[in-house]
Image (cartoon, rainbow, N blue to C red):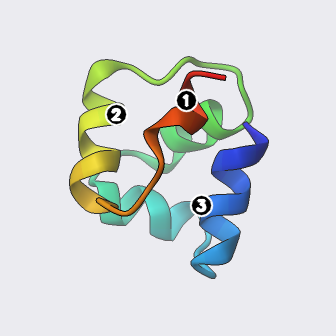
């Protein structure tokens, strides 16, 4: 998910830091970011809660 990678890079965060902020495992975050796993409802809720400025549309392209 290039848009998710761009979002993370714009915040100058590593995958581990993103996962920690969202309170999810780095492994799960990495799989979503690389497109190996679709983000589940919990992931989407945590993303929006953690990054309210984030554009949720990046997950629905």
Residue 44, numbered circle: 2
Residue 2 location (% of width, % of height): 78, 44
- Residue ranking furthest to the right: 2
Taking the spot 71% from the left edge, 54% from the top edge, the residue there is: 5
Q: Residue at x 70, y 47 (%)?
A: 3
- Image coords of residue 27 (percent x, y): 54, 41
- The answer to which of marks 2 and 3 sits earlier in the sequence is 3
Give the answer, above or below, for where 6 lies relative to 44.
Answer: below
Mark 1 crowdedness (10 Å alpha carbons): few <14, some 14-19, many ≥20: few
Residue 59, given in percent of the width and then of the height, sits at: 55, 29
Which of disc 3 and disc 1 is earlier in sequence? 3
User: Badges 1 and 2: C-beta atoms under 8 Å apart?
Assistant: yes
The image quarter in which residue 23 lies: bottom left
Distance from disc 1 to disc 3, alpha carbons, whole Å, reads 17 Å
Q: Upstream in the sequence, badge 1 or badge 2? A: 2
Rounded to the nearest angstrom, the CA distance separating label 2 from label 3 is 16 Å
Q: Would you identify the image quadrant in which residue 61 lies?
A: top right
What residue does disc 1 label? Answer: 59
């Amino acid at each position: 998910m290039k848009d998710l990678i761009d979002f993370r890079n714009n915040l100058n965060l590593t995958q581990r830091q993103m996962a920690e902020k969202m309170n999810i495992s780095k492994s799960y975050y990495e799989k979503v970011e690389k497109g190996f796993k679709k983000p589940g409802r919990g992931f989407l809720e945590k993303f929006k809660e953690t990054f309210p400025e984030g554009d949720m549309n990046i997950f629905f392209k």
